[in-house]
Amino acid sequence: MSAKDKIVEDDAIAIPDLQGLSRDTLMAAHTLRRSITGFARKLRGFRSDHEISGAKLSLLGRLHRANSPLIAADIARVEHLQPQSLTRIIAELDALGLIRRRQDDVDRRQLLIEITPRGKKLLAQNAVQQNLWLAQAMTAQLTKAERDILRVAAELLDRLADTEDAMPVSTETKGSV
């Protein structure tokens, strides 16, 4: 059994069959998922000492990139959060002065949520440490051509992240108890 076969077999619980996908695509997805998970863990180690959770940082980043206020329903959809979780996160970020909530002038039932200057500052401080480590690691470990490949890969990952689910993924495994 090759190392590739072993990897797929080890993840048999996570992916019970190929679901119509080629083995090469499955292996690429497996390798990419593991790499991204490890990379995210490494980056978390370079966060500023602010004790803001990843979910809260993600929401702040979403508001910052939107460059305009968003309504809670839209945030919940794109961040894949349950309304109860989002309500709690929004309340905590508001209490810290990192976001601001206000009624929509057009539809008074809607609350608009926007990032504050303090929230933008926290995001920037967080990004500086991570970007500095990453730039140093890329310079030390990668050639210019490899860094260019990573730039393209980042764009591809963004496209994948912005893609609506192509097909429902079953969480049930064959022969599960």
Image (tube, grey):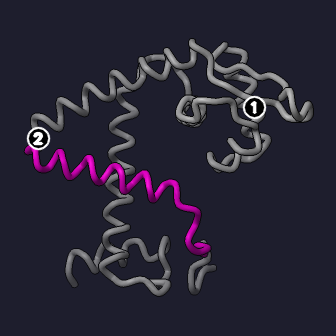
Q: Identify which residue, 63 or 86, lies in the foreground.
A: 63
Where the N terminus falls, by quadrant? bottom left
- Extent of the magenta region: 143-170
Amino acid residing under circle 1 = Arg
In the rendered image, the residue lying farthest to the front is 106
Label 2 sits on residue:
141
Label 1 sits on residue:
88
- The residue lying at 68 percent from left, 30 percent from top is 69
- The residue lying at 71 percent from left, 19 percent from top is 100
- The residue lying at 37 percent from left, 72 percent from top is 10
Q: Main secondary structure of the magenta part?
A: helix
Task: Please tell me in which quadrant of the rendered image residue 8 appears.
Answer: bottom left
Q: Identify which residue, 30 or 64, lies in the foreground.
A: 64
Where the C terminus falls, by quadrant? bottom right
Amino acid residing under circle 2 = Gln
Q: Is residue 67 above or below residue 95?
A: below
Task: Please tell me in which quadrant of the rendered image residue 115 appears.
Answer: top right
How many numbered discs sit on the rendered protein? 2
Task: Please tell me in which quadrant of the rendered image residue 176 appears.
Answer: bottom right
**Mark 2 or 1, nearer chain start:** 1
